Image: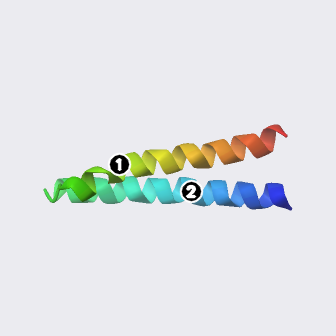
């Protein structure tokens, strides 16, 4: 049960990370770059890495 929850959370983190990076790219095209929007890309990459880590950890068990 715990492994299933970790895999689902990993997939959600991965999807959320991709959506955040897509939002960053949209805001970048509209030239609305500020301190707030410049951190979106880093947050998206961090969530993608977290998602992969959770999934890989549960698969390797």
In the rendered image, which residue does mark 1 sit on? Answer: 41
Q: Position of residue 49 (x, y in %)?
A: 55, 43
Q: Could you give the CA–CA distance between mark 2 and mark 1, rounded to whole angstroms?
A: 14 Å
x 76%, y 61%: residue: 5
| Residue 21 picture location, percent across and down | 38, 52
- Above or below residue 1? Residue 47 is above
Q: Residues within 10 Å of mark 2 (few under 14, many from 20)?
A: many
Q: Secondary structure at mark 1?
A: helix
Q: Are marks 2 and 1 in contact (CB under 8 Å)?
A: no
Residue 17 vs 60, above or below: the answer is: below
* Mark 2, residue position: 13
Instruction: Decide if residue 52 is on the left or right side of residue 45.
Output: right
**What kind of element bears circle 2?**
helix
Q: Residue at x 35, y 48 (%)?
A: 41
| Residue 8 as seen in the image, left or right of residue 3 | left
Q: Residues within 10 Å of mark 1 (few under 14, many from 20)?
A: some
What residue is at 26 percent from the left and 58 percent from the top?
A: 36
Residue occupying image coordinates x 58% and y 47%: 50
Q: Disc number at residue 14?
A: none
């Amino acid at each position: 049960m715990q492994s299933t929850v970790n895999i689902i959370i990993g997939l959600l983190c991965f999807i959320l990370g991709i959506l955040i990076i897509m939002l960053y790219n949209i805001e970048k095209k509209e030239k609305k770059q500020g301190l707030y929007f410049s951190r979106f890309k880093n947050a998206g990459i961090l969530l993608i890495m977290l998602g992969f880590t959770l999934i890989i950890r549960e698969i390797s068990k």
